[in-house]
Image: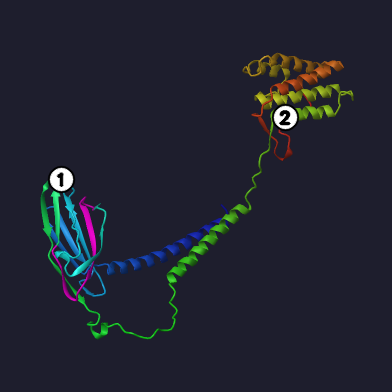
């Protein structure tokens, strides 16, 4: 990794750290305020045997325009079942108020494996003055003896409900003319977080660009089947017309190499760098994929050696037969499975004009 990359990585780390500190401080402040605002005004605990019931009121002094937020929290051991109550409007338990909403939370386990159950109620008072939330009964029992129920009964709780008109002068709402439009101060914490996020994204984009700018380009590989490449080499050789020019030895060197390199690409047998004797020895130990062609290949290579080294002068018919043997063998064993890399137009292997 170069020096520029290290510098960019450090910059990104510092920005992330600063953003995290700002976000953490803002979150702490909001969490602290939220915890203070959620602290109940009334919290009473009633216990009996394995069950403890906590009655909580968010406020015990409200106006007629507000609602009473009541919550019951039951804590019991796992070997007991708890039946939390349901309140109904218009009955004896709610004579001076109406049930607006109720919510039963899912049971959970505390750190001591006690079962915590809870239910919340929103109550709307009908009258002002002291309004009593009546005693509430919570049943519990053992699953082994469901008919033998036990109870905890909470104490009544008074809530002071004030009329808006009877509030003290300092608490009376003021009626005023519609004020002019005012600009709300911006939340600088959110603005700073947004700026940091934008800077981090820009730094990451720049880092990716910088790393990839000098990256080596990936060149797609071009493949050609072994038989197609060999036939092209054979046709190129015939177009040179070496036989009519009297270059018999060179022709046999070249056509022998065409076949040798084809065998290497097609059958994975190292033929080009071996003498005829070494190649025939390796050919004898090859698997059965060549079959009866082993004998034909041996005769062909021996014939080529006679021309190259013994100054044998083949007849035109023998030359045509040699060309036919090579072409027929390539066509007979052709397969698209065996591919040769010819990327950038370079020859995969240079055909040597020698033994």
Residue at horizontal 43 percent and vertical 84 percent from the top = 180
Q: Is residue 188 left or right of residue 249?
A: left
Residue 125 to residue 326: above or below: below
Give the CA distance from mark 2 to mark 1.
Answer: 83 Å
Secondary structure mainly formed by the magenta segment: strand
Residue 348 to residue 291: above or below: below
Q: Nearer the viewer, residue 147 or 333?
A: 147
Residue at horizontal 10 percent and vertical 53 percent from the top = 150
Which mark is first along the chain, 1 or 2? 1
User: Which portion, as a residue range, is magenta?
Assistant: 109-135
Q: What residue is disc 1 on?
A: 143
Residue 170 to residue 16: above or below: below
Q: Nearer the viewer, residue 96 or 284?
A: 96
Look at the image and tell me in which quarter the C terminus lies.
top right
Residue at horizontal 35 percent and vertical 66 percent from the top = 28
Residue 53 image position (x, y, % from top left): 16, 59
> Dot 1, how many residues are within 10 Å of its Cα: few (below 14), some (14-19), or many (20+)?
few
Residue 275 image position (x, y, % from top left): 72, 20
Q: Nearer the viewer, mark 2 or mark 1?
A: 1
**Secondary structure type for disc 2:** helix
Quadrant hosting residue 7:
bottom right
**Secondary structure type for disc 1:** loop
Quadrant hosting residue 26:
bottom left
Q: What residue is disc 2 on?
A: 228
Q: Is residue 330 magenta?
A: no
Residue 33 image position (x, y, % from top left): 31, 69
């Amino acid at each position: 990794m170069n020096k520029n990359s290290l510098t960019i990585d450090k910059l990104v780390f510092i920005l992330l750290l600063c953003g995290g500190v700002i976000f953490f401080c803002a979150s702490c402040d909001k969490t602290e305020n939220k915890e203070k605002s959620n602290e109940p005004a009334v919290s009473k605990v009633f216990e009996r045997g394995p069950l403890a019931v906590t009655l909580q009121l968010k406020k015990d002094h409200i106006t007629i325009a507000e609602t009473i937020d009541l919550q019951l929290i039951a804590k019991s051991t796992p070997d007991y079942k708890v039946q939390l109550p349901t309140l109904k409007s218009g009955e004896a338990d709610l004579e001076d108020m109406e049930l607006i909403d109720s919510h039963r939370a899912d049971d959970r386990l505390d750190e001591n494996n006690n079962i915590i159950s809870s239910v919340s109620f929103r109550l709307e008072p009908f009258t002002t003055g002291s309004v009593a939330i009546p005693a509430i009964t919570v049943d519990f029992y053992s699953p082994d003896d469901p008919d033998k129920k036990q109870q905890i009964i909470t104490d009544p709780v008074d809530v002071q409900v004030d009329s808006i008109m009877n509030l003290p002068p300092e608490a009376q709402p003021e009626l005023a003319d519609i004020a002019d439009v005012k600009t709300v101060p911006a939340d600088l914490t959110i603005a700073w977080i947004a700026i940091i996020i934008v800077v981090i994204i820009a730094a990451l984009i720049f880092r990716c660009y910088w790393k990839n700018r000098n990256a080596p380009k990936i060149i797609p590989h071009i493949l050609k089947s072994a038989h197609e490449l060999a036939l092209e080499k054979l046709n190129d050789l015939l177009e040179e017309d070496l036989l009519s020019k009297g270059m018999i030895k060179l022709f046999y060197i070249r056509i022998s190499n065409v076949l040798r390199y084809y065998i290497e690409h097609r059958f994975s047998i190292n033929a080009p760098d071996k003498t005829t004797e070494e190649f025939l020895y390796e050919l004898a130990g090859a698997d059965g994929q060549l079959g009866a062609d082993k004998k034909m290949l041996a005769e062909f290579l021996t014939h080529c050696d006679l021309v190259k080294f013994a100054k044998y002068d083949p007849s035109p018919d023998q030359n045509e037969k040699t060309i036919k043997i090579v072409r027929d063998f390539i066509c007979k064993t052709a397969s698209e499975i065996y591919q040769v890399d010819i990327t950038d137009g370079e020859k995969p292997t240079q055909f040597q004009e020698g033994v």
